[in-house]
Image (spheres, rainbow, N blue to C red):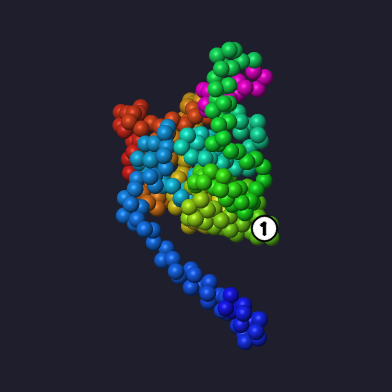
Amino acid sequence: MEAAEMLSDGKIGIEQFKKRIDSYSDLDLLSDNGLPDDMIGLITSSSSVLKFDKYRHTFGDTLGISENTLTTIAAYTSRGKSALALNLANDLRKSYPVVYFNLEMNKRGFVSRLMSMNTGIPIKKFCGMNPDPGQTELMEKAERSLNDGNFIAVHGSRSAGSVQEVVKQLYGRFGRPVVVFVDHIHYLTGDMKLLERDRISEAMKVLNALAKDGKATVFVLAQLNREGESKAGLRNLQGSSAIEQDSDNVLILEPAEDETDGFGTAKKDLHMYLKAMKVRDGTQARCSLLFRKDRQQFVEEYGSQGRTGKSPERQLWA
């Protein structure tokens, strides 16, 4: 008000007015030291670890994936990363509002995967199916559960900016952070004048900001390139080093065994490794999961002895 009056009286010019407003804004920002009143309560609280139910051992106890972080799940093509993401989203919706940005699958394929993992009915049986009463009951129960308002699917092309806007709206609606899945980062649109790696870099910065601002916990799916496929690592992240740099955690999903049997037939159940190559607040580790491909289900192998008599499920990853 004082600056406006001085401008009105001709005591200062417009440039001086702008400088005064800027200086007042700086003082306003400095008036808050940015420190919470209860710092001890903040750092000793256990609520920062994501609350998983089905995957609490792998993602909670072993990896310690925290709220308000950005986690990248990477794999080669057709290795189950979308199925794993849907399983995690399906689990987390019991404790959080979840929004899944489906940029890769059509709506029928997306719903088929969700229904298969929730009913145990093989995914291939849905097309042209004439369900018996028991199957109908299972599907109706799954449908009611998925339509409880805590799980939101957004289909089709999106930019990182539109993801940001949707998340802000949901944060306002629910009054608390949401869990976001982006499937996958290479399908996000952006400034097409930029190279792919630069578009990915810009998108990762936007998604990272959502996590750091406290509005969301973000999971991003990413593709691995085929170079050095036998030993997948951070160097195989396709498109941009920004995926590694802007991610708090980077998890790589890969088979722990041959994907086909001795006759060359694809196995229905496949043992997988989830390698935590980067964990900002935790420990690098390798976890074991069983991928039941026909039902799109990932099952923790925590605590089992496995086929070798050993227990590799929680071994540290060297």
Q: In the image, 162: left or right of 207?
A: right
Question: What residue do we see at 67% from left, 42% from top?
Answer: 156
Q: In the image, 34: left or right of 10?
A: left
Q: Position of residue 90 (x, y in %)?
A: 51, 34
Q: Nearer the viewer, residue 203 or 33?
A: 33
Question: What's the magenta region?
Answer: 117-129
Q: In the image, 143: left or right of 29?
A: right
Residue 97 position (above or below residue 14): above
Question: What residue do we see at 58% from left, 31% from top?
Answer: 147
- Mark 1 Cα-neighbour bin, 10 Å: few <14, some 14–19, many ≥20: few
- Label 1, secondary structure: give it: loop
Question: What residue do we see at 64% from left, 59% from top?
Answer: 195
Q: Position of residue 211 (x, y in %)?
A: 49, 52
**Amino acid type indicated by mark 1:** Asp
Q: Is residue 183 magenta?
A: no
Q: Position of residue 98 (x, y in %)?
A: 53, 40
* Residue 38 seen anywhere in this rendered image of the structure: yes
The answer to which quarter of the image holds residue 256 is top left
Task: Report which residue position mark 1 lands on.
Answer: 191
* Residue 182 seen anywhere in this rendered image of the structure: no
Question: What residue do we see at 62% from left, 22% from top?
Answer: 126
The answer to which quarter of the image holds residue 221 is top right
Point out the residue furthest to the bottom here. 11
Q: Nearer the viewer, residue 146 or 135?
A: 146
Q: Position of residue 51 (x, y in %)?
A: 41, 39
